[in-house]
Image: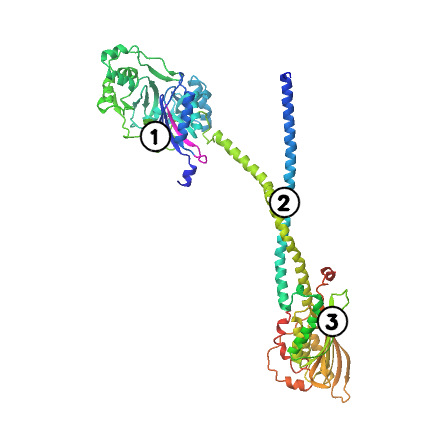
Amino acid sequence: MRALTQREKRTVRIGGIGLAVYLVLFGGLQVWTFFSKKRAEYNQSLGQVHDLRRKVDLYQGKIQHTKKLMESFHMDPARMTRESVMGQASAAIQRAAMGGGVAIGAVRESPARPSSKELGSIQLEAMGPAPALLKFLEQTHSLGFPLIIDSMQIGSDPSRPGPLKLNLTIIVLDFDQWNLEKRHA
Amino acid sequence: MNAIQLVTPAQYFLDIGQESLTAFNGTAGLELPLSRQPDGRLTEACKQDLVLQLQKFFDRKPWQPRARVICAICARGVSLRRLSLPVSGKEDLNRLLPLQIEREFPLPPDQLAWGAQSLNGTKSQTDGSGPRRELLVAAVKKDNLEDYASIISDSGGTALFTLAALARSYLCPQEPGLYAVLSVGRTSSELITIDGGVPVAVRVLAWGLEQFAGRQGNSPMDAAAQVPQSSPHEAAATFRGIAVAASVRPISDGLSPLVSMINGQALGRKVFVTGIGSLNADTNFAGQLTQRIGGGVECQPVDVPPGAAASEAILGLQRVLDRQGSQPPLVLQLKQTDKKTRIAPEATLKLAGLGVGLALLALVLPFFEALALKSHLAHKLEAMKPETARFATIDRELDFLQYLEQSEPPYVDALLVLAKAAPPGTRFDSVSMNRRGEVSLRGSLQNGQQVAELRSKLIDSGFFASVGIEDQSPTPDRQKVTVRMSAQWKSADLRKAPPPEPLKASTNAKTSTASAIPPAVGPQESPTPRQNPLTPRIKPN
């Protein structure tokens, strides 16, 4: 193999340098792109973490409020089972009435429409002295079930002077069908 | 070691002679031999050895600043000139001085290492050219100092050069008028003449203690015979080293060559002699020299503290630094600056490198952070995702409970308002309400006036939005009026809650019940159990 001339050596050297510069630039660009991508992903994750932290902070207040309401109603909606709520609520109402000296008369349960947010309604007749009836009315809210007294009628029984007669229609709400969008809509 | 000592550079002294170099750090000293080429410059082997030895001696840690090394150099090749310049500002002086040096010295200023010392006071010229400033300029060929500077720099120090002969003079009493300081070395000596505290001339004398000792041991005849062959030369300090040999006279003992060299020079009245500490006390070198010089010149040995590890030049430097501050009065500079602090090029490079490194680190660190922490962050996010699902449950539960709370009809409040509004003698047969707020009641009152009163009271209570009388008719016996009323309570945010009922004895309860008027709705009393269960549930305005 013949020896390279100075001119050829110079050409090869310049070519080598050019190639090296190209490779360095190209490789540098690739590395830069790779690292930039990683950094962008990291920043995105960081943003998510910050959002989450803000959300958690926001929910601290909501959690406190929810706890307070749960204590007030003696109820944890998430633990109620749809199948047994109606029966349990009816039993609890009757227990509360009897415990307060209120006599329970006829009780009728009727299911609600499947599309509604109600599980059903309970109609009952109760009889007793006025203080006991008022106490019973008050207790229905804290029996541990989602009960709303839809209507009430209080009056005296002409045939039995003394005790008052109370007709109540109580609605049992269905937590499983509770849908935020539906309500807000 | 305190913080100031950490950042303050250590200070060392070097006395660079012809044959040896003495280093001193304030407590300990080190003497190193020097080997020179025929032109007077150090050999490469000597330089390398010096660097190694000085590095050990300086013992500088990498984090410490460079040591400050004050070097006293021998007078070989050093020229002193006294210059007079017009009084001007500092900038003008820095501009004028090199021009003056170029005129006075045989070499241009850029080939010289030179320094200037301002002499005290200014002189007014008789020719009317204005006051002039007196300056003492010392200069030496730059090559001579560059070797030393390079060695010291490689050893971890920054060199500051001054004249050893001048430094030795600081050990002597500052005599008024003219005097001289003779430093006797092993093979050569230095003589500096000082007039009024200002160095006038400095000379290197090719005579040392070796000649003195050799002559003392030989007979005067032998000495006289030997003189022509080994005649010492008197040498003025010039840029080319030893100057032209002076006229040599036959001598009879070891001091004669020295005497012949210094005779004829203006010595003043006193010659202080240093470097003779190694001679026996009974030699009385100074006394012999006084006798030999004659002419009323008195030679006086300079007292050096016994056992001092440093040379006389270093001791003189220490003394002048103690007196005058951080640097000797005359400093020979390799590169002339405008007296501002300059950072050594090596330090500049280090600082620049550090800056670039920090900038790169700042640029790269976010990327490394992304690489290092991304997986950790992803795991954390994954772990938190199930938790976020609970947010929906919390929202749902909260909404449900809030709905339940808001939908709770105020039946008991309505009954209370009704009971409070009913005038005495009122009897309600039935009261019915629903959660939409529709109230209807049926009862009997004593007269129409009471009906109107009941109605207005219900409206005034702020609880009801509307109260209407559907039917009002007198009973068949005309004793009472039966009435059917309907009302609508206001929405929760508009209606006024009834004030809490004060506690009172329920004495009328039995009579009310007996008269078949519902106690809860009867006009004579308010329901007894309201105080406890209901009071907390009354909503504030």
Q: Amino acid at mark 2?
A: Tyr
Q: Is residue B184 left or right of residue B449?
A: left
Along the line of sight, the residue nearer the viewer: B399 or B387: B387
Chain for mark 1? B
**Same chain for marks 3 and 2?**
yes
Mark pair 1, 3: CA separation: 108 Å
| Residue lying at 63% horizontally and 74% vertically, measured from the top left | B534
For residue B505, which quarter of the picture? bottom right
- B69 magenta-colored: yes
Secondary structure at badge 3 equals strand
Q: Which residue is mark 1?
A: B29
Up/down of A68 relative to B347, above or below: below
Q: The C terminus of chain B lies in which quarter of the figure?
A: bottom right
Query: Of helix, strand and loop, which one carries label 2?
Result: helix
- At x 65%, y 35%, the residue is A29
Which residue is disc 3 drawn over?
A: A121
Residue A42 tag number: 2
Mark before the other along the chain sequence, 3 or 2 = 2
Chain part drawn in magenta: B61-73
Q: Residue furthest bottom?
A: B477
